[in-house]
Amino acid sequence: MSKKKITVQVMGSGILQDDVLMVGDKLLKQLKLQAGYPVQLAFGSFRQEMTTISVPRYDGIRLGSGTASSMGIPSDCTLRMQYSPRNKTLRLGPLISVLISRDYPEQNDKPFGKITQFCRELSSACGKQGAFVYFFTPDHISGNPDRVEGWVFSNGWKKATLPAPDVVNNRLTSRKLENKPSVQYFMKEVKSRYGAYVFNEKFLDKHEVFDALKGSSILRRYLPESHLLDSFAIFKRMCGLYNQVFVKPVRGSLGKGIIRINKNADGSFTMLTTTTGSPLKQNYPNATKMFGGLSGKMRSTSYQIQQGLTLIHHNARPVDFRALVQKNGNGAWSVTSIVARIAGGSHFVSNLARGGTLSTVKDAVAKTTLSATAKANAHSKLKTAALRIAAGIDHAIPAHFGELGIDLAIDTSGRVWLIEVNSKPSKNDNTPLGDVKIRPSVLKMLEYSCHLTGF
């Protein structure tokens, strides 16, 4: 099977029939094709039999406007190409799609809100690397998975109707949207009908991750003791074992609703709950009373109870770390970035949505009580832990993931711990958005998509 990157030109209406494909003579020779012979043109789910015509002194292909319209591509775009002599198929692509939660058509400059810059960067990277990308929401999904209305960037953001893609990057940030029957049907059908790849196809909840990883002796060293909070017996045991525990919504995000419980010297307890402002503080004389205070919340929300850790602090503020781990062009997990997150103000969580700030690992650990050796080894130990945990997720959880946000912590002895794993890592939290520069995380996603599709 041969591969090449080519320019695709679109000929005006009436100039070229829609079942004719003009191919540069050099390209015909490279592909060992003879002019006049039929080939199957493929682009995502699009298929059409075409008759080839040779074009002297030209190294690309030319399509009729009707064919290009069915494919959803503009003129002069650069695409990768594969030709399979066995089934006489000329395949263009990869056709990549990104499923996002919502769009804002009335905002011409920011049709995707906070992730518009990410979408623009990915479009630019695809244009340079010979791929094509479109963005769509659950509202764009119809009963026919073969055609999708989506957004493309071509001298500005435009709506277009395109074939089902080769790859779907599921960037939905709402479980409610992800579980819609239309979304689940679409993802199932594009995989079974067209062989499409869907990655980051589901959310991960905290209990699922810890339960899946604890079977590995290598990974257990990173796991604080953690249980589904489903009884007073578990609650009482954990509060008796540890001077500090955390109670977290199993399906929470952005630090919402996290509870920190401290056991005081007199046997009483202090409970702090994250809010949009300063944490809410409540005192309880014993574990029984405190559990009673939690019972109302437990009726509507599932919680995980977790061993508290003695974390390192930077200027008296707790520090944790976010590792962005992505599969690369070889399909292997690699660490794209690790940043430190320093809790803000009176908060005990470091999420940026709760006032946290970002720092490099080196700067964050510099003002801690870690030993000089532990400081020097911090980045390496975090990287090793992130890669092991990502591999563990792949092995233990039956779903396809291409990128993970792995939250880690370091305690005062220098030991690395897992806090949680996010299967929909933010595209606007961790990196300042520039006007031109394409982030490594965007390029890595494109490389993995090309790897999946064989382009």
Image (tube, helix red, strand yellow):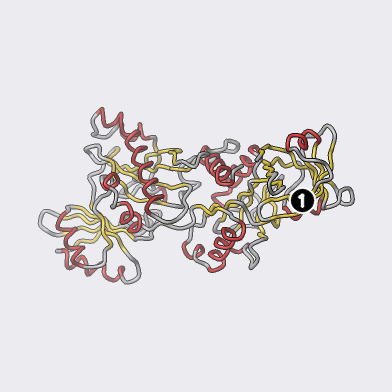
What secondary structure is found at the residue carrying circle 1?
helix
Residue 52 percent across, percent down from the top left: 81, 45
Q: Is residue 379 above or below residue 95?
A: above
At horizontal 33% and vertical 43% (from top left) the residue drawn is 320
Look at the picture and state if 146 lies above or below 51.
Answer: below
176 relative to 335, above or below: below
Locate residue 442: give its quadrant: top right
Three-letter code, disc 1: Ala
Q: Quadrant of residue 323?
A: top left
Rendered residue at 73%/38% (across/down): 31
Residue 199 location (% of width, % of height):
51, 52
Residue 351 vs residue 137, the one in the foreground: 137
Left or right side of 263 for 200: right
Residue under label 1, please give it.
68
Query: Left or right: where does residue 8 sit relative to residue 259?
Result: right
**Number of other residues with Cα within 10 Å of mark 1, as a class: few under 14, some 14 to 19, many 20 or more:** some
Q: Residue at 48% of width from left, 48% of height from top?
A: 402
- Relative vertical location of residue 453 with respect to residue 24 in this rendering, above or below: below
